Amino acid sequence: MSAVPKGAVVAIKWLVIAFGVYVVIKNPAMAADIIKSIWSALVSIAEAIITLFDHLLGRK
């Protein structure tokens, strides 16, 4: 059983989506910077995981 009611989860998701749309409309440059930062972080995480497995498998 979930501690958070399903309706609350749906409401929070819609609030996050609405906020995202608001940010894009009000300040598209900032929204682009946020997306670039998130992408950069994901790339760094993926590279770190690849490096870890390379070391574990003795490739480096």
Image: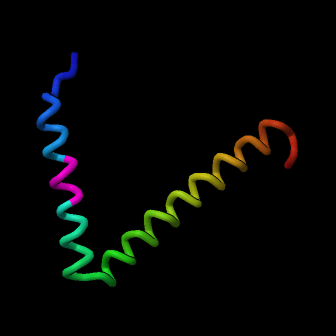
Tell me what residue is drawn at x 49 percent, y 64 percent: 39
Q: x%, y% of residue 42?
A: 52, 57
Tell me what residue is drawn at x 50 percent, y 61 percent: 41
The verdict on residue 41 being magenta is: no
Residue 10 lies in what quarter of the image?
top left
58 w.r.t. 1: above or below: below
1 w.r.t. 36: above or below: above
Foreground residue, 59 or 22?
A: 22
Q: Using residue 1 as the reference point, say whether residue 38 is left or right of it.
A: right
Foreground residue, 50 or 24?
A: 24
Q: x%, y% of residue 36?
A: 46, 72
Q: Using residue 12 as the reference point, say whether residue 41 is left or right of it.
A: right
45 w.r.t. 3: above or below: below
Tell me what residue is drawn at x 37 percent, y 71 percent: 34
Q: x%, y% of residue 53?
A: 74, 41
What is the quadrant of the N terminus in the image? Answer: top left
Q: Using residue 53 as the reference point, say whether residue 16 is left or right of it.
A: left
Give the dominant element type of the magenta stretch: helix, strand or loop: helix
Span colored in magenta: 13-17
